[in-house]
């Protein structure tokens, strides 16, 4: 199975900025993170009212609110002004939450200030040359870096919809790769070499969560319009693509599909100052 191609720096910067143009759709269509993932993250990080948290790429605040409910002091950094505004509205009842509109790659994060640094469906948009070190610098000794990766449509096996929808991609997405094959769980990584830094962290831990969801045509078409590979398509072709997907769901799947989405939770603990690596 081929690994997904990584975008160039220029493409990465352009694509990560595209979400803000569909902020309202993003807020409506993106599902919440699994309860089991949230429970494990909160148990691992041991947050309380004395904790300090930094969230990178908070979007409209889907993960931010469960973190805020712990009473922790929380700084949420978001690149897009529209998404940041939605996050502020969602979190208006939490005075200890501060949403900062900034590019984390250029933001001057306070050093050694946070017990938890977390990035949910956002870490891959950061500068790969500096993101790990930047997060480590922001952590107190013993603090944790948590990364949530979302694998849309990835389950134990690829369903019929995952194959049939390729017709719409092939017709309307100029960047479509005809050799593409839908991924399954066995294609997902079980190591993350960039976190294997004994000079900075204890060994990383991975937890994986698969969630079966039922999407009606309107819901799925909203979700797919928040994907960066779709947002890069010219607007008229993008509308045709969405119409194609809607017709496919209505005519072949009775108006709704069931699809598995998988989430990876990576957690590493920053080593205490002066501690030797055994």
Image (spheres, grey):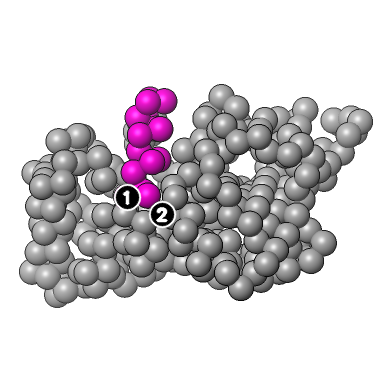
Describe the element under mark 1 as helix, strand or loop. helix
Q: In which quarter of the image is the N terminus?
A: top left
Q: In which image quadrant can residue 194 be found?
A: top right
Indicate yes or no whether the magenta region holds residue 12.
yes
Q: In this view, does 256 lie above or below 166?
A: below
For residue 82, the mark is 2
Horizontal side of 262 relative to 160 (left or right) equals right
Is residue 78 positioned above or below 249 on the image? above
Q: Position of residue 162 (x, y in %)?
A: 24, 55
The circle on residue 21 is 1
Which region shows up in magenta?
7-21
Q: What residue is rendered at 53% in x and 62% in y?
A: 88
Secondary structure of residue under mark 2: helix
Task: Check if mark 1's residue and mark 2's residue have beta carbons within 8 Å.
Answer: yes
In-front residue for pair 98/126:
98
Return the disc, 1 or 2, that comes first in the chain's sequence: 1
Q: Residue at x 41, y 25 (%)?
A: 9
Pinpoint residue 241: horizontal percent, then vertical percent. 13, 51
How busy is the neighbourhood of tag 2: few (under 14 within 10 Å), some, or many (20 plus)? Answer: some
Cα–Cα span, label 1 and label 2 = 8 Å
Residue 63 placement (x, y as % from top left): 55, 61
Q: Residue at x 88, y 34 (%)?
A: 273
Q: Is residue 259 left or right of residue 271?
A: left
């Amino acid at each position: 199975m081929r690994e997904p191609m990584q975008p160039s720096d220029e493409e990465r910067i352009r694509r990560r900025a595209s979400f803000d143009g569909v902020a309202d759709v993003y807020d409506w269509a993106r599902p919440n993170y699994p309860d089991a993932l949230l429970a494990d993250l909160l148990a691992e990080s041991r947050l309380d009212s004395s904790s300090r948290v930094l969230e990178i790429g908070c979007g409209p605040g889907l993960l931010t609110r469960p973190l805020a409910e712990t009473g922790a002091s929380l700084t949420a950094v978001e690149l897009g002004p529209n998404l940041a505004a939605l996050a502020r509205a969602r979190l208006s009842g939490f005075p200890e939450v501060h949403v900062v509109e900034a590019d984390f790659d250029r933001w001057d994060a306070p050093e050694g200030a946070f017990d938890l640094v977390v990035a949910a469906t956002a870490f891959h948009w950061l500068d790969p040359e500096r993101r790990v070190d930047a997060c480590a610098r922001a952590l107190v000794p013993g603090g944790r870096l948590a990364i949530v990766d979302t694998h849309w449509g990835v389950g134990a096996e690829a369903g019929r919809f995952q194959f049939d929808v390729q017709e719409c991609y092939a017709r309307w997405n100029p960047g479509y790769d005809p050799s593409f094959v839908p991924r399954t769980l066995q294609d997902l990584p079980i190591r993350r070499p960039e976190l294997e830094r004994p000079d900075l962290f204890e060994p990383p831990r991975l937890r994986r969560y698969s969630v079966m969801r039922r999407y009606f045509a309107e819901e799925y078409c909203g979700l797919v319009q928040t994907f960066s590979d779709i947002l890069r398509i010219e607007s008229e072709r993008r509308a045709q693509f969405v119409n194609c997907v809607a017709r496919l769901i209505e005519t072949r799947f009775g108006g709704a599909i069931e699809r598995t989405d998988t989430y990876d939770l990576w957690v590493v603990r920053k080593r205490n100052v002066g501690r030797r690596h055994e």
